[in-house]
Image: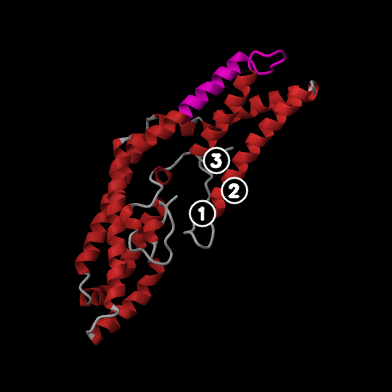
Amino acid sequence: MTKYNNAEFSNLVNRIHTLLSALKGKEGFPIPEAKMQELKDVCDTMTYALSYSRTMPETVAVEEADKKLDKVIVYFHRAVRNECDSHNASKATVAQALYEKTRPFVGIQSLPLGQQVATTVSYLEMLKDEAASIEAVGLTSTIEEMTLALEMLKNALDTRTAAEANTVVSKAAENRPAYCSLVADVVALFYANALINPTDANKAQMKNLEQIITDQENAHRLRRSKAQSPDAPEDTPDTSPEDSAEDSTGSSSEGGTEGSTEGDAPKE
């Protein structure tokens, strides 16, 4: 369970709680009332943490800064490519050479935020060596704008991190080990009861619980396989219990997808 992001873990806990709540009060129900209440509290905390991380003002600022950087990156790559067809032979030659240097970075606006920031920092460092070519094709001001947009995004991310430090989002992350332990205890009690009292009803509910767990595991594997497929930007293993800032602003912004070329993939 620790490998699941907040959304996946929240879904799992809520489905388990719904299943058990339907059985609560029936003869032989093995989960103590205190455990059920704890499970309900976890459901409420995780649900609130998910909604809070997406509506806080700092997240809005991150999304706006991300869109601005995405648009500048897309414009720069499109402009370089267009200049390859310039009627000015000299400019076209310079643009073609610049295009070959920048092509590996096409689509970086679609990377998860953490990777996008780190990659753009490296990209701008590399582009310093291409300053003469960039000036020749008239894109010096675009690089300056990209630099400013990157700094804006970095500052917005830092501000959000500071704002989240003492919120329900960070507390949910800190308590994830305890939450996972609680869910494991509840599931173990349920399984033990089904084995000790192998009635048809208990066997059927145990299969239901197994299916919930299987469904969540399959959903997690599908998400990871999509993120790590050759057609998508490489993503880091999702071992953190936090639903990170990258996940909170997951979809590509309008500027990030418009006019993008090879290498583009949705942000996760």
User: What percent of the width, then of the height, locates residue 48?
Assistant: 42, 29
Q: Which mark is residue 227?
A: 1
Residue type pointed to by label 3: Tyr
Residue occupied by mark 3: 4
Q: Which mark is residue 221?
A: 2
Which residue is outermost to the bottom? 89
Lower position in the chain sequence, tag 2 or tag 1: 2
Q: Circle 1 sits in a helix, a strand or a loop, which is it?
A: helix
Q: Nearer the viewer, mark 1 or mark 3?
A: 1
Q: Main secondary structure of the magenta part?
A: helix
Residues drawn in magenta: 24-46
Q: Residues within 10 Å of mark 1 (few under 14, many from 20)?
A: many
Q: CA distance from mark 1 to mark 3?
A: 14 Å
- What residue lies at 58% left-to-right and 15% top-to-bottom? 34
Q: Circle 2 sits in a helix, a strand or a loop, which is it?
A: helix
User: What percent of the width, then of the height, locates residue 261?
Assistant: 38, 66
Lower position in the chain sequence, tag 2 or tag 3: 3
- What residue lies at 60% left-to-right and 20% top-to-bottom? 21
> Which quadrant holds residue 160?
top left
> Which quadrant holds residue 260?
bottom left
Residue type pointed to by label 1: Ala
Residue type pointed to by label 2: Arg
User: What percent of the width, then of the height, locates residue 164?
Assistant: 36, 35
Q: Nearer the viewer, mark 2 or mark 3?
A: 2
In magenta segment, residue 131 = no
Query: In screen coordinates, is 256 left or right of 44?
Result: left
Query: In screen coordinates, is 76 left or right of 49?
Result: left
User: What percent of the width, then of the height, locates residue 145?
Assistant: 22, 60
